[in-house]
Image (tube, rainbow, N blue to C red):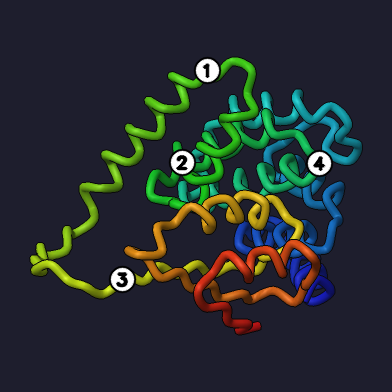
Amino acid sequence: AVGVLEKALEQTPESLPLIINLTAAWIDSGNFRSALALIARRFGYPAYDRVKDYDDLVSYLEKQEPTDVPEHQLALLYNNVGCVMVNLGLSELGCRCLKQVVKYSPDYLQAISGMLFLMNYREEEGPGDIYRESCRWAAKLNRTIQPLPEVCHGPSKERLRVGYLSSDMHAHPVGFFLEPLLKQYDRSRFEVFVYSTGGVRDRHTERLKVATDCWRDVN
């Protein structure tokens, strides 16, 4: 796919859809330098072919207000830059890029989620800032969700079934987090099911199995 996109771009070097798709493909293959260079060139960054100062590049992009680029495509370009920054471990710059994404595409849920997550790594963002921003987006998004009708059930003697689905049911942060949670369920009230979609099995997997009522491998 990368080769086809590269050849197509040679024919139409200013095609935004091609730039967006090619940089995304380069990012997926780990070719971050080429992805940044192409986007930097599109925005007229002076040193696009030798980007070294990532903060300078992001600051430059933040100041751009191109009128010849549709906002949804502009959001995708910023998103690709943000993906590069996150892959390079530059969470601060990644968060700034995603803020630009939601500026131009305020309904881009993946970018909103990523932005709120990366705010935890910004020194200038305190817990209160993150909480308020999360509440602001939650209130905005909740207005687009139709509430489910209320369902009233009488008292039941059956246990409530709770299910977990994950590919990380092993020595992984998710597995470590879940173990004490699974063990704390009141088994007289809850029946716990785990659906493991991952292929990794280790000692921690066995401990998780013991903490459930029903374990199913579904990978």
Q: Amino acid at mark 3?
A: Arg
How far is mark 4 from mark 2, CA to CA?
21 Å
Q: Quadrant of the C terminus?
A: bottom right
Callout 2 environment at 10 Å: few (<14), some (14 to 19), or many (20+)? Answer: many
Q: Residue at x 41, y 27 (%)?
A: 131
Q: Are marks 1 and 2 in contact (CB under 8 Å)?
A: no
Q: Compared to 114, does 4 lie above or below?
A: below
Q: Residue at x 53, y 32 (%)?
A: 65
How far is mark 2 from mark 3, CA to CA?
43 Å
Residue marked by disc 4: 88
Q: Quadrant of residue 134?
A: top left
Task: Give residue 127's position: percent from left, percent from top.
Answer: 49, 21
Task: Give residue 91's position: percent from left, percent from top.
Answer: 69, 34
Q: Earlier in the sequence, mark 4 or mark 3?
A: 4
How far is mark 4 from mark 3, CA to CA?
47 Å
- Dot label at residue 102: 2
- Nearer the observer, disc 4 or disc 2? 4
Callout 4 environment at 10 Å: few (<14), some (14 to 19), or many (20+)? Answer: few
Q: Amino acid at mark 4?
A: Leu
Q: Amino acid at mark 1?
A: Gly
Task: Give residue 36's position: percent from left, percent from top.
Answer: 78, 45
- Dot label at residue 159: 3
- Nearer the observer, disc 2 or disc 3? 3
Q: Amino acid at mark 2?
A: Val
Q: Secondary structure at mark 4?
A: loop
Q: Earlier in the sequence, mark 4 or mark 2?
A: 4
- Dot label at residue 126: 1
